[in-house]
Image (cartoon, rainbow, N blue to C red):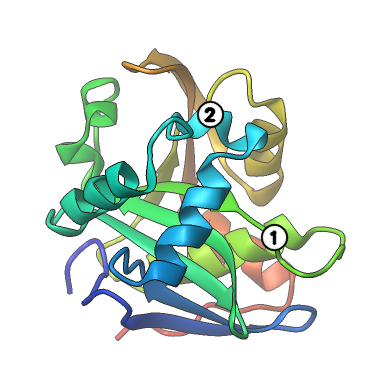
Amino acid sequence: MSLLISGAPGAVVHRTHDDALGELVLTVLDVDDTADLDVVHDWVREPRAAFWGLGELSREELRELYRYVDGLETHHAFLLRRGEQPIALLQTYDPAHDPVGECYPVRDGDAGLHFFVGSHGTRLAGVTTRIILAFGEFLFSSPEAVRVVVEPDVRNDAAIARMRRVGFELGPEIDLEHKRAQLAFLERSAFEGFAAARNRPLPPVE
């Protein structure tokens, strides 16, 4: 199995159950599906998505961007659904093949992660943490994945605090083309401890 799991556009790549959110299903983003494209385009134009830097793209420009991503073996995009409702966008990448990897010593098994939580149909406290848990289960379902890497904007205090609560260790600040970012790392063992504390043991890897 490769470091990063993916599949054909629209394919289901992970299912999990959350006691509060119910069944969560992760599918490969399909921008040729009008519904998928529309929801992502709406999300990236929200003011709180400014850190993503995609708010100025038209629908067609966004479609072409994600078509390009879909053609790469080192970068992938997904939608997380609660029932039929998309609730979050996930992007994974191999830092060894990304500008982030030029800013720190990449280790074998490092898996990069970006995500954006959209509308989720509930005001449940801690919903973002529950979504991060689902994403962690997915990433670590690959036996090749040893550590998750994130690089939120240094100004995004809420995201950085959330990462630390989940178990990420802060690394150095780095300069990327579009932002100054805070590197943070989550070891598989730390995530397993976090999941176990929430009575959510990781499924065995295949």
Task: Give me the residue at 38% from left, 36% from top.
Answer: 57
Q: Is disc 2 in contact with disc 1, using a CB cutoff of under 8 Å?
A: no
Is residue 160 shown above or below 66?
above
Residue 81 x, y percent position in the rendering:
56, 75
Position of 177 with respect to 98 (left or right) is: right
Task: Give me the residue at 35% from left, 72% from top.
Answer: 33
Dot 1: element: loop
Q: Amino acid at mark 1?
A: Ser
Task: Give me the residue at 48% from left, 55% from top.
Answer: 40
Residue 82 x, y percent position in the rendering:
63, 78
Residue 144 x, y percent position in the rendering:
25, 64
Question: The N terminus appears in which quarter of the rendering?
Answer: bottom left
Who comes first in sequence, dot 2 or dot 1?
Answer: 2
Q: Which residue is mark 2?
A: 51
Q: Residues within 10 Å of mark 1 (few under 14, many from 20)?
A: few
Q: Amino acid at mark 2?
A: Phe
Dot 2: element: helix
**Depth order, front residue of 184/93:** 93
Task: Give me the residue at 66% from left, 35% from top.
Answer: 48
Position of 85 with respect to 57 (left or right) is: right
Q: Which residue is mark 1?
A: 119
Compute the Cα span from label 2 to label 1.
18 Å
Q: Residues within 10 Å of mark 2 (few under 14, many from 20)?
A: some
